Amino acid sequence: MEVIIQPTREAAALLTAKVIADEVRKNPSAVLGLATGATVEPVYANLIEMHHKEGLDFSLCKSFNLDEYVGLSGDHPGSYRYFMNSHLFDHINIDKRNTRVPNGMASDLAAECLTYEEAIWHAGGIDLQLVGIGMDGHIGFNEPMSSLQSRTRVKQLNPVTIRQNAGYFGGADKMPRRAITMGVGTILDSQRCVLLATGSAKAEILAEAIEGPFCARVTASALQWHRRAVVIVDEACAANLKNREYYDWSFAHEPEWAPFRG
Ligand code: F6R
């Protein structure tokens, strides 16, 4: 796992977008794993700009989103399909038929989860997975004590997560209680994983996830086990990290990162 600390939230989001853009340029038919939420909004804004100004081409890409609320259709403004269309897909040249978000309205949710896993497999697996971290340390909606080998399935949301996302629904009482989420094991199967975390509110849980023990209580800690994970944070979110000197040294000297240094 590599850790890159950027001065601001904007710089962290821009670097994340550059990593995704680099993947798409090197592999035009890349299979992208995508996340939703406030943290990744500026990443998508940067990708849209790169598409318009630099011709970043998504026409051959496929995408799979991490999660979707159970009971919400894609035209519900709180749904993750709606989020993805409005924050990214409607503004780039990806073929929407190649974008998958779990179907939260499926009559047979277990079958939907199985089909989702199979679709990822048929696409050849995820080349680059973008994730955020929840206030409870989740990735996707893998709430505390999720199996670290889990696959796509339905999870009960943690009250911490319900409070975190209640604002999107005008109150916790209006929020769905369950979601379909890729499993931790599904995320670990990706070839590359980028975790973006910003803001002081996540400093404590972020430090637990990346410098604490590998444990199901904080499912983001599973990324310590990932073959090729990079964690991109801003200064505010890096506040509790202990190995800061090494992270900065490594980013400054690692040849792979040379094109990404400012
Ligand atoms: C969203 C997802 C979640 C979020 C996390 C952070 O698809 O899977 O794990 O990434 O809850 O959300 P924000 O960025 O809104 O703080």
Image (tube, helix red, strand yellow):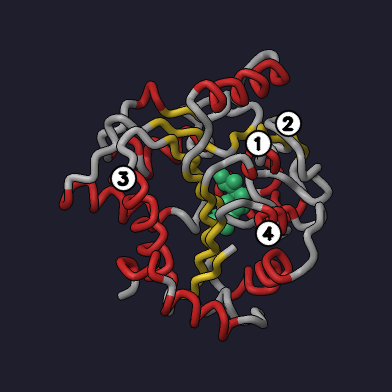
Residue at 27% of width from left, 40% of height from top?
Answer: 91
Residue named by callout 2? 154
Say what amino acid the circle numbered 1 marks: Thr
Say what amino acid the circle numbered 2 marks: Val
Q: Alpha-carbon distance for marks 4 and 1? A: 20 Å
Residue named by callout 1? 181
Residue named by callout 3? 26
Say which label, 3 or 4, has the lower sequence index. Answer: 3
Residue at 34% of width from left, 70% of height from top?
Answer: 258
Q: Alpha-carbon distance for marks 1 and 3? A: 28 Å
Q: Which mark is residue 224?
A: 4
Q: Secondary structure at mark 4?
A: helix
Residue 28 rendering spot, x and y as whole percentages: 30, 37
Density class for disc 1 (Cα within 10 Å; few <14, some 14-19, many ≥20) is: many
The residue sitting at the bottom extreme is 245
Q: CB under 8 Å between callouts 4 and 1?
A: no
Density class for disc 3 (Cα within 10 Å; few <14, some 14-19, many ≥20) is: few
Q: Which mark is residue 213?
A: none
Residue 35 rendering spot, x and y as whole percentages: 52, 45
Q: CB under 8 Å between callouts 1 and 2?
A: yes
